[in-house]
Image: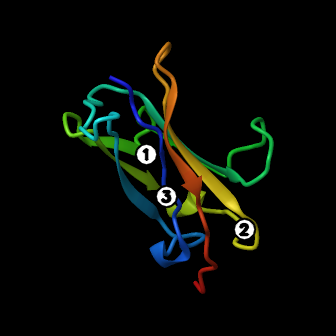
Amino acid sequence: MAIVTRRFNFEKHHEIFARKKFVAEFTTLDEAGDAVDISGWALKFVVRRRGGAANDAEAASVTTAGGGITITNGAGGVCQVVVAASAMTMDPSKDWDYELSRTDSGEEGVLAYGFFPVLQSLT
């Protein structure tokens, strides 16, 4: 079973705002389009400035161990990512990318990635 790395670009209509809580659901699929059982996996979601080096500081980062990622349906391959408003400090005038990865030792791999446009909040 090969896991498919999915590119999903968030767009402005997804309404990701600076200084507001971000919540998204991701489903991990195999090459046949079937859900992959992610029960017990260690996951990490990061946001970094587009075009930055891999060792640049992460603008936001949450993990399953830290409680920012919850596996809501392990057998169905579904997890929910929650980034607190206090961590959503990205500058809306810059371009951002995200990555959701499996981080289990020996099983590391990117599950989803893409653009992460951040809008300016008025409050």
Quadrant (top left/top right/bottom left/bottom right) for the N terminus: top left
Element carrying mark 2: loop
Say what amino acid the circle numbered 3 marks.
Answer: Ala
- Disc assigned to residue 84: 3
Task: Give how far apart the Cα atoms at labels 2 and 1 are.
Answer: 21 Å
Disc 2 versus disc 3: nearer the observer: 2
Examine the rendered structure and indicate whether residue 120 appears above or below residue 85: below
Give the residue number, with chain letter if any, for mark 1.
68
For the view shown, which residue lies furthest in the bottom direction? Answer: 122
Give the percent coordinates (x, y) of residue 9.
53, 60
Above or below residue 105? Residue 14 is below
Label 1 packing within 10 angstroms: few (<14), some (14-19), many (20+): some
How far from the left and from the top, in percent, is residue 71?
29, 39
Categorize mark 2 by other alpha carbons within 10 Å: few (<14), some (14-19), many (20+): some
On the image, which quarter does residue 82 sit in? bottom left
User: Given the image, on which type of amino acid does mark 2 rest?
Assistant: Asp
- Taking 109 as reference, is 68 left or right? left
| Proximity of marks 1 and 3: CB atoms separated by less than 8 Å | yes
Helix, strand, or loop for circle 3?
loop
Quarter in which the C terminus is drawn: bottom right
Q: Is residue 61 at all visible to an observer of this figure? A: no
Residue at (41% x, 60% y) in the render? 23
How crowded pointer 3 is (Cα within 10 Å; few <14, some 14-19, many 20+) is rated as some
Q: Tell me which numbered mark, 2 or 3, is placed earlier along the sequence.
A: 3
Report how far apart the C-alphas of labels 1 and 3 lie in the structure: 8 Å
Report if the CB atoms under discs 2 and 3 are less than 8 Å apart. no
Q: Tell which of 69 and 76 is nearer to you.
A: 76
Question: Where is residue 16 drawn, in percent x and y?
Answer: 52, 70
Q: Which amino acid does label 1 sit on?
A: Gly
> Residue 91: which disc?
2
Mark sitting on residue 60: none
Q: How far apart are marks 2 and 3 (CA)?
A: 16 Å
